[in-house]
Image: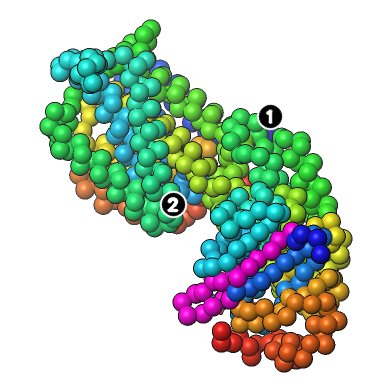
Amino acid sequence: MAEPLLSAEGLTKAYGGVRACAEVELALAPGELRAVIGPNGAGKTTLTGLLAGELRPDAGRIRFAGREIQGLDAAARARAGIGRSYQITSLFPRFTALENARLAVQVASGHSFGFRRAAARDRRLAARAEALLGEVGLEARAAVPVGDLAHGEQRQLEIALALAGRPRLLLLDEPTAGMAPEESRAMVALLQRLRGGVTILLVEHDMDAVFALADRITVLVGGRVLATDRPDAIRANAEVQAAYLGQDGGDGAETAPC
Amino acid sequence: MARLAREHGAGLLLGLAFALWPALAAALGLEWSLELAARILIYALAAGALNLVLGYGGLVSFGHAAFFGAGAYVVAILAYHDMVLGPVAIAGLEIPGTSDAWIAFPLAVLVAGLLALVIGALSLRTNGLYFIMITLAFAQMIYYLFVSLPDYGGEDGLSLFARSSLRPLELDDNLAFYYLCLGLLALLLAAKALVVRARFGWALMGIRDNERRMTALGLPTFRYKLAAFVLSGAVTGLAGALIANLTEFVSPAFLSWPVSGELLVMVILGGIGRLYGPLYGATALLLLEFALKEWSEHWQLALGPILILVVLFARGGLAGLRRPRGAGHG
Ligand SMILES: Nc1ncnc2c1ncn2[C@@H]1O[C@H](COP(=O)(O)OP(=O)(O)OP(=O)(O)O)[C@@H](O)[C@H]1O
Ligand SMILES: [Mg+2]
């Protein structure tokens, strides 16, 4: 395999007595779409937080695009090319879809110490923001305040914000969370369009989506990596079945000891 | 044109009223009211500066009296050295005082801005309630510092012998001073209208509404909050320089927490994050105080319930009365 775009070694994070992530090893090849699955509380969101720089690991190293990044804070990692979306929608609720996208583009396009020119009049920002909305299928909803968007549309906008900085790596934390089946299918189609162009780490509960999209799957249980393999191999893996796939929703493994 | 009228109509109208008031007051024999009107303009300037961090940045500073008082003391101390104490020797250099506003006002702005830089750098790492308490604590420290400086009047404060001179303007002329206050307020309101619509304003509003997301997008939020805090402190210092000239007297009361509280009330009353909100708020609060004082010496008892009613029934403050649901600014 070529040098991985992202690799993590021994990533560990504990909350009190709970080891949310325990010595996690991870290597994402450029262009790969990697799904991360695991029961509730397995540490998937914690792992995204550690990679994005929002959480400080207790131990471990992260390399991205050929350099160590564990010393960089979240903003610096974003500028280095890591975009992310949140499991719980995290937008600017008072602004319209276009204003949300434009703000994201503004941040991505350099510093924000502009004091005179109205940002709304900046044609370059607007053009790129409109293109972003088009990419996620929201162009017709540009003028709608975020609060008035349907849940599925908010999730699409969440992806648009993650894409604003033209990231090389996308960390997507359950993009289909809370979606109706129809909306879910639209999201899978969107991810289908994105794959290949950008390396993606996709945390997902929806197994149809996972098996439709993933090049490889990492199974996390109790903060530990149980297995990393191709989808068909994961499906056939007895350990994985026992720990996760066999159980409905996997709630039983929530308090897995580590 | 219609958009201009909708967005600025009420604010410009009130501004026009302030511009015409001296003539009207003279005709009605109400010259004494010029002092009150100038006080409103000066507080509107300070509250407008607070509104930048509070309304657009979401930073509840309970310590803006520090910048207000610092601006006032810079003017007063320089004048005091000019008139009474004589030059100070610092590192072998004889530094004279001055009553020249061209020197004293920019220095007031600079000192207040530097103070905001220090206080902001130390307090902006915290959030919410902690930020409120820390800004309050810093302001109280400055307050006690000046209470315990006998050279500069201590608790009793300092009197100015005359207003600063701003050649060719004579500030001892009440009318000239009034129009200086109005002009500076208009200038800084116009500047703020630009700033909050520019990239900087959007970054601030983004931080206010979702700092975590702004960080994830790649914005180093701390330096933007700090920049806003410094700008806000500097302009508040200018307001302080004006208030020292209005009253021709400064005391630690300018640095005390009730001033910080009053500024907060003005912003909230007028409409948080609304361009003209602080002007409405300062006008309403100071007129109300004035009227209630005439009516009873226990005026503060009546002020509380009135403020609560406004906050309950005019959410979005006075600026929100006309336009119930604004786009976050305007
Ligand atoms: N801030 C926190 N404080 C304390 N414990 C936490 C915190 N965040 C996560 N945890 C714990 O760490 C473990 C992993 O949580 P995490 O949110 O990473 O799981 P997850 O795999 O994303 O779960 P889900 O599928 O429900 O989203 C859980 O036991 C959780 O209770
Ligand atoms: Mg999660």
In percent of the image, x 68 and y 29: which residue is there? B1
- Residue A150 image position (x, y, % from top left): 74, 64
Colour basis: rainbow
Q: Earlier in the sequence, mark 1 or mark 2?
A: 1
Instruction: Look at the image and say whether residue B259 sits in the magenta stretch.
Output: no
Secondary element at tag 1: loop
Kind of residue at disc 2: Arg
In percent of the image, x 56 and y 84: which residue is there? A258
Residue B125 numbered mark, or none: 2
Residue A201 numbered mark, or none: none
Q: Quadrant of residue B162?
A: top left
Foreground pick, B308 / A98: A98
Foreground pick, B256 / B225: B225
Kind of residue at disc 1: Met
In percent of the image, x 67 and y 78: which residue is there? A225
Q: Quadrant of residue B144?
A: top left
Residue that carries the numbered disc 1 in the rendered image: B1
Disc 1 crowd, CA 10 A, few/some/many (<14, 14-19, 20+): few
Q: Which residues are magenta?
A: A5-22
Task: Evaluate whether residue A71 shows in this view.
Answer: yes
Instruction: Name the chain letter of the residue that bears numbered label 2.
Output: B
